[in-house]
Image: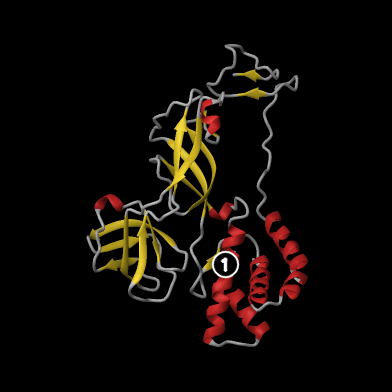
Amino acid sequence: MKAYGSILSSIQQMLDDDSDETLADIRRHINTAYQRIAEQRNWTTLTKQITGMSSILPGDLTRIIYVEDDTDYCYFDIDFPARYQSNKLYNYFRNMTVATPLLTGTDGVPTLNSTTFTSATGGFTAAMVGEYIRIGVDGGIYKITVRTDTNTITIDAGYRGATTTAQYYEVRPVGTMQIAFTDENGDALTTSATLKLWYLAKPLPVYNLYDMILLPGDCEAVRIMTMRLMLESQKYVNDSMKALPDYNEAYALMRSLDPTPSRYRRPRNSDGTMVRFGRHRQLNSRYSRDGSIYL
């Protein structure tokens, strides 16, 4: 991980320009580069886990990684048609996204680094604690932790943006994913409070010089992509393409520092036969069609 200020300073020195206009431009492109790289794989530093949930998933969720219930209920990712064709006992699918927020407003008042957010029109309710709110245009999505009154809430992290007024906001933002759970017959499952879900979270934007970019290593890939984005915005596409090999090398180094297995090894017995665990049995037999042993 690396502080945003370090990358900002490096780029400013290269450009030999510390004007406010250039600062705003660099910050915007750094955040764009950060978000793009953050979405490319399941980074350990951006992985979150929740226990128990409704059909509404966390507002900062980018991608589901894994779902299980208790110790031997593994849920499998399926799509719409497979809901009625799966031979798995426990399945999940992302059936839609939120189209209408719980609450919107245009008079939000966020304060730099403050966890207090206010709105004169308000409408915040106690039921909104645990929901997520999108504030302004900086891309930050914050979790609501406390509802003080109808006009004031507390968010889980200090606001990453300039103090301002008249900001648009959404509670349970448009695009928030929803999830459904089904059995092998396509019937809806009632999930327990012990259901666990791991997911890739969208990081908060960086604004303060000390804000950390939550990616492994020195984040050189973020700096190079930022420079490429700035070149492209100024129509220097060829110069941007020349930096692509350097970016690929930096990104490969970042990946090597945070290895994620692409394929998990299955346990085998002394004969080399795969052993599977769980409550799923095929054909009421100890052996599956592929010769695996079920325990």
Which class describes the residues within 10 Å of circle 1: few (<14), some (14-19), or many (20+)? some
Residue 45 figure quarter:
bottom right
Task: Name the spot of residue 291 as percent of width and height, x first.
Answer: 70, 17
Residue 243 figure quarter:
bottom right
Q: Residue at x 24, y 64 (%)?
A: 151
Task: Name the spot of residue 270 as percent of width and height, x first.
Answer: 73, 21
Toward the viewer: 45 or 179? Answer: 179
Q: Residue at x 65, y 47 (%)?
A: 260
Return the residue at label 1. Answer: 32
Up the image or down, 220 lies above or below 93; here it is: below
Residue furthest top in the image: 284
Task: Name the spot of residue 36 as percent of width and height, x first.
Answer: 60, 61
Up the image or down, 155 lies above or below 72; here it is: below
Residue 284 figure quarter:
top right
Residue furthest left in the image: 149
Q: Amino acid type of disc 1? A: Thr
Q: Which residue is drawn at 28% across and 67% down?
A: 118
Is residue 215 visible to the viewer in this orientation of the structure? no
Which quadrant of the figure contains the C terminus? top right
Toward the viewer: 253 or 82? Answer: 82
Q: What element carries label 1?
A: helix
